[in-house]
Image: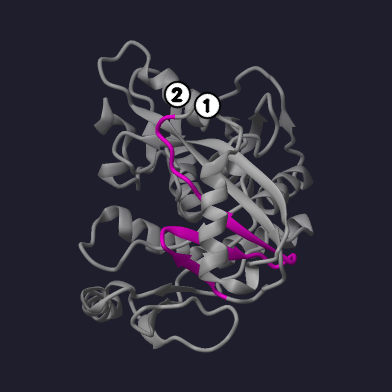
Amino acid sequence: MVDITVRGAGIFGLSIAWECVRRGAAVTLIDPSGPGAGSSGGLVGALAPHVPENWNAKKAFQLDSLLMAETFWRGVAEISGRSPGYLRSGRLQPIPNAAALARAHQRADTAKTLWQGRAVWEIVPQDKTDWSPQSPTGWLIHDSLSALLHPRQAVGALATALARHGVTVEQEAPDRGKVLWATGITGLAALSAGRSRAMGTGVKGQAALLRHDAGGAPQLFVDGVHIIPHQDGTVAIGSTSENNYAAPDTTDGQLDDVITKARAAVPVLAQAPVIDRWAGIRPRARSRAPMLGKWPERPGHFIANGGFKIGFGMAPKIALVMADLLLEDLNNIPDSFDVAASF
């Protein structure tokens, strides 16, 4: 039995701990603030792919992870007895003009090959339901790869599944065996210390939760805003991306503007009450891709960081490749993700 210490109980730390436990490792999970205390405790939960063009290792990795997600989260739900709120319900996006419509048709063609026939990117007419966003061209992009989950429910389900295997989140404990650092913005700061160039930074996001039941409907992406119909009778709206901010955990008029955009895009939300507002700092690695792998300067220590905007979507496959590395010393990490490439 291999000893693994995971520091950080956000989505990366929890997912990797879960995969290691499933494979028989003895895991110690540490986070002074508890599970999902950082950016993983947000509201949105959009698991959406990059556009199917200019293919690269990051997009291929994300595709694999999104296709793995249903099985991954079903397994977590079965062990924990708790729903992570996962649903592969697809996504709709308005097409604003003729040039965008032409690009959308090109991407529909490339998706047939790049998405391996396991999901579609297609152009559909705007319908007359109250959930269909207005489109200047009368056409929408629909993709069947996008999914959603409820971040807080997903974190809770993972923490409960781990607890069923005897692994609870401890505030502090000694390191045992190999040590994985999945500590978000504090981890990026530690990696950047003493270097002439930062390894990454924190980007603030703000999001809101509205009381409206559109469960089962596709998520929407309109005018830069994600509109996510969770299955618990709420709709998440988000988010801002702020490189400069006065306070890391407070909401302000920028969130009000996002809510206004969402209500304009989907009039059925016009009177939906706001029941929660959230702000937090999300870790963005310098390359904008996740940072995974061995910590070059610290033998026996490993990094999983930089899940900016795509952490939940990437988590199933990141858990797989990091468990391969931790437990079997197999490196299946794309070169562009490897921590060593950033040093």
Q: Are marks 1 and 2 in contact (CB under 8 Å)?
A: yes
Query: Which sits in the foreground, 80 or 10?
Result: 10
**Residue 192 in which image quadrant:** top left
The amino acid type found where label 2 is placed reads Gly
In the image shown, does 11 or 317 lie closer to the viewer? Answer: 11
Q: Position of residue 112 (x, y in %)?
A: 29, 80
Where does the magenta region start and end?
Answer: 218-244
Instruction: Quickly name the residue at label 2.
Output: 300
Q: Is residue 33 magenta?
A: no
Q: Where residue 82 appears, x then y in whole percent?
A: 77, 58
Q: Position of residue 75 (x, y in %)?
A: 66, 61
Residue that carries the numbered disc 1 in the rendered image:
179
Residue 305 appearing in the image: no
The crowding category of the residue bearing disc 1, from other C-alpha atoms within 10 Å (few below 14, some 14 to 19, many at least 20), is: many
Q: Examine the rendered structure and indicate whether residue 154 appears above or below residue 217.
A: above
Residue flagged by tag 1: what amino acid is it? Answer: Val
Q: Secondary structure at mark 2?
A: loop
Q: Which of disc 2 and disc 1 is earlier in sequence?
A: 1
Q: Quadrant of residue 159?
A: top right
- Can I make out residue 311 in this image? yes
Residue 135 locus on image (x, y percent): 40, 78
